[in-house]
């Protein structure tokens, strides 16, 4: 089911240091039906590379298990579309309009549909999940059903020989073989191709104690410094870095081929390796223990008072919280979600059922733990009826707190 990875994915160093250990955990997005078996458990431990500042999991779970029937679908929230608007403007400022675009990890094609309607074209997706490619096709988006690398790039090149923009949103952290991605980029690029890699901002993740974003799909916790190391000796360099505030902080790392001589000054601040350090990782690991304890204690105290508690948002983060805290159905009675593919299934590693979001107003729990805390504002506004009826949210990060009003 998994294998250990001994060397740094970015710079190849074998001098990796353990910085955070969440024990042995189920796969965060493996929401099984009551009748189905699950794949099992794997260690969830982060190793830090002092040489290039990359954080990576000690193990790599077989991607065939993680991605062949992938249930994560790109959010279609207003917040996500505002983010699409921003990244589209930032990319087109660099590439111009009418650029051809390939998206690596295109999921159900949501971004590519947006891109087609906002000046990009032609577009094509690459994603290993056949079920999502099927959905994308319904929206008119073609997907090469593979992990991105030279073979996938060769298939794209059959109908889009050279591409102006390659976008990889939150996908580098899922892929083990980065050298394979770089080789694929070589196949698809011309001298002016822009590559845009969006990744969670590890510096912010550590500062905000978002340990719940650490799970088996997220193999790497990138820094710009580690990407600079990765690109050493390749045809590519880091050209520009943008910061976004979405989901607790993200970076857009733009690459150009080495023929492109200009480099934006935004890269300078990231070149030195002090933004993300071994000490910061270890401090976060300690604070995460306190965060887990604060939620466990709050849930236990509320139960002692006879209160009922559910979860809100069957995110992968919810799996990490539930399993790291050892919650069972008696602690969290159910978790609501809007995703049809998750409803009727269990939170991985537990018998906590996932139910339709409408159940919140039917079952009227006293408290709902907001496991999709990254949509805090949106969720508070959307659930006025729950709040007006006396319901309260518990926001678990950075430490558990009760929120009663929008
Ligand atoms: P997401 O933010 O993508 O987090 P992760 O990467 O940790 O899975 O997932 C959010 C989940 O929460 C997703 O299953 C949809 C669900 N959700 C709701 O049920 N209601 C909501 O109002 C929102 C915003 C999300």
Image (cartoon, grey):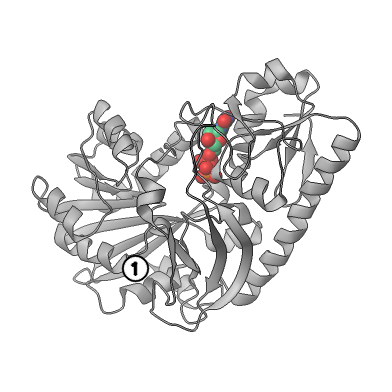
Q: Is residue 189 visible?
A: no
Q: Position of residue 142 (x, y in %)?
A: 20, 37
In the image, taking residue 380 as reference, residue 68 lies left or right, namely: left
Which sits in the foreground, 201 or 323?
323
Q: Is residue 169 above or below residue 301?
A: below
Determine whether 176 is above or below 153 in the image. below
Residue most toward the right?
305
* Picture coordinates of residue 405, whole percent (x, y): 77, 29
Is 126 situated above or below 283? above
Residue at position x 79%, y 43% in the image: 401
Q: Quadrant of ligand 1?
A: top right
For the point 23% across and 46% down, which residue is it? 101
Name the residue beneath numbered marker 1: 238
Residue 188, x across and y down, in percent: 16, 57
Task: Label 1: state its secondary structure.
Answer: strand
**Residue 325 spot, x, y in % from top left:** 72, 50
Image quadrant in which you'd find residue 189: bottom left
Label 1 neighbour load within 10 Å: few <14, some 14-19, many 20+: many
Quarter the N terminus occupies? bottom left
């Amino acid at each position: 089911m998994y294998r250990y990875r001994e060397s740094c994915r970015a710079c190849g160093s074998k001098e990796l240091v353990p910085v955070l250990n969440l024990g042995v955990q189920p796969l965060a997005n493996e929401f099984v039906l009551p009748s189905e078996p699950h794949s099992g458990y794997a260690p969830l431990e982060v190793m830090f590379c002092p040489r290039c500042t990359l954080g990576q999991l000690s193990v790599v779970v077989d991607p065939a298990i993680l991605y062949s029937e992938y249930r994560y679908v790109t959010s279609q929230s207003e917040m996500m579309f505002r983010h699409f608007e921003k990244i589209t403007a930032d990319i087109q400022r660099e590439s111009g309009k009418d650029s051809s675009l390939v998206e690596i990890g295109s999921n159900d094609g949501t971004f590519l549909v947006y891109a087609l309607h906002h000046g990009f074209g032609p577009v094509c997706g690459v994603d290993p999940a056949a079920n999502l490619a099927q959905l994308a096709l319904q929206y008119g988006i073609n997907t090469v059903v593979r992990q991105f690398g030279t073979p996938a790039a060769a298939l794209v090149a059959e109908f889009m020989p050279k591409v102006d923009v390659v976008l990889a949103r939150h996908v580098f952290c899922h892929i083990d073989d980065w050298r394979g991605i770089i080789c694929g980029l070589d196949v698809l690029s011309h001298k002016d191709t822009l590559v845009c890699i969006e990744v969670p901002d590890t510096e912010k993740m550590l500062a905000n104690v978002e340990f719940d974003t650490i799970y088996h799909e997220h193999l790497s916790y990138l820094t710009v410094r580690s990407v600079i190391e990765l690109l050493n000796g390749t045809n590519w360099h880091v050209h520009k870095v943008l910061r976004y505030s979405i989901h607790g902080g993200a970076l857009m790392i733009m690459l150009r081929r080495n023929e492109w001589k200009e480099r934006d000054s935004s890269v300078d601040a990231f070149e030195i390796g002090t933004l993300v350090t071994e000490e910061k990782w270890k401090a976060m690991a300690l604070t995460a223990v306190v965060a887990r304890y604060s939620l466990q204690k709050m849930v236990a105290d509320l139960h002692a008072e006879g209160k009922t508690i559910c979860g809100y948002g069957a995110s992968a983060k919810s799996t990490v919280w539930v399993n790291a805290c050892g919650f069972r159905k008696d602690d969290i009675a159910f978790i609501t979600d809007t995703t049809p593919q998750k409803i009727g299934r269990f939170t991985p590693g537990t018998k906590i059922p996932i139910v339709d979001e409408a159940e919140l107003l039917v079952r009227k729990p006293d408290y709902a733990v907001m496991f999709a805390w990254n949509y805090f504002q949106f969720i508070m506004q959307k659930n006025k009826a729950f709040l007006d009826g006396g319901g309260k949210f518990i926001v678990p990060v950075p430490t558990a707190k009760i929120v009663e009003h929008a």
